[in-house]
Amino acid sequence: MPLPIIPGVVRAAVIGQTASGGPWVNVWHLRHTPVDPSPTTAQIDAMHALFVRMYSGTAFSTGAPWFNACPTALVVSRIDYTILDGTALGYTRPFVASGAGGAAASPAEVAAVMTLRTNIRGRRYRGRVYLPQPASGSTIIGNDGKLSATILTAVPTQAQGLQTALQAIQWQIVVASYGKSLVKDPNDKYDKIEVTWSPFATDVSTFTMDGVLDVVRNRKS
């Protein structure tokens, strides 16, 4: 489906390769405030300089970037930014980094799930990011097969620190809600109908993770 129009919001697609060479992509949404229908490339550049630290670079406070938990063969190559104003062309910034969690890699399809929570209840107000494969070392994945407590604290702390730093330059990580869903047909209890809604974005208030690793089928290799 085509991308929505949400004033002030930029779609950020972080693109890289797993340790076995397969592609991975994480999609985030960020809004410039006060709302500007079309943020400038200079404003995106300023945001980019902070946003990359979610994956690699300097820690925010006691946080840690996700790549600290990833195998050394896992890499990222660029971030594709798209202003959701309905007319803007894509804007790509190179971002070259690799994992720093050791050579041993978990399977390519394994992902850690970060949940993006807002102050409003409901599925349209909650997002997920399937972070790329972690390394398989014992300090990262324990004997129970779950992410270590250290990572489960440090990575959300990094995301929260990023959010605070972005707010200082008038950016905010948001949950963008757009698409379609199936609801019960009021005229036929055995049928469902497809509904859509006007796209919107909601500020993220907290970031959480649990230790259970998930599987992204299209990352299998």
Image: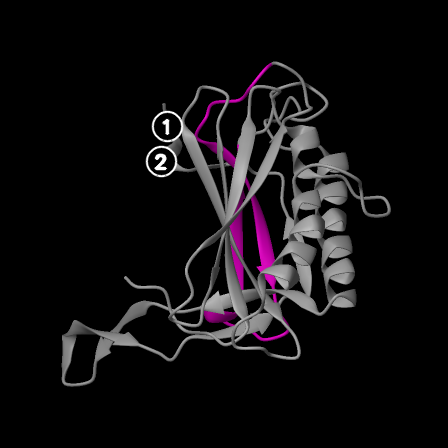
In percent of width and height, residue 157 lies at: 76, 49
Please report the bounds of the magenta region as a residue range. 104-132
Local SS, label 1: loop
Relative to residue 59, is residue 122 depicted above or below? below
**38 sits left or right of 142 in the view:** left
Near mark 1 (Cα within 10 A), the count class, few <14, some 14-19 or many ≥20, is some
Query: For the image shown, how many numbered marks are present on the structure?
Result: 2
Magenta stretch containing residue 13, yes or no? no
Q: Is residue 195 visible?
A: yes
In percent of width and height, residue 87 lies at: 38, 69
Q: Tell me whether circle 1 and circle 2 mark residues in contact (CB < 8 Å).
A: yes
**148 sits left or right of 127 in the view:** right
Return the mark for residue 217: 2
Q: Is residue 131 visible?
A: no
Q: Nearer the viewer, residue 100 or 144?
A: 100
Q: Residue at x 52, y 77 (%)?
A: 37
Q: Residue at x 60, y 32 (%)?
A: 96
Local SS, label 2: helix
| The N terminus: image quadrant | bottom left
Q: Residue furthest top?
A: 103
Image quadrant where residue 187 sits: bottom left
> Gap between marks 1 and 2, in whole Å?
6 Å
Relative to residue 221, is residue 132 depicted above or below? below
Q: Residue at x 53, y 49 (%)?
A: 129
Dot 2 amino acid type: Arg
| The C terminus: image quadrant | top left
Image quadrant where residue 177 sits: bottom left
In percent of width and height, residue 50 lies at: 71, 51
Return the mark for residue 220: 1
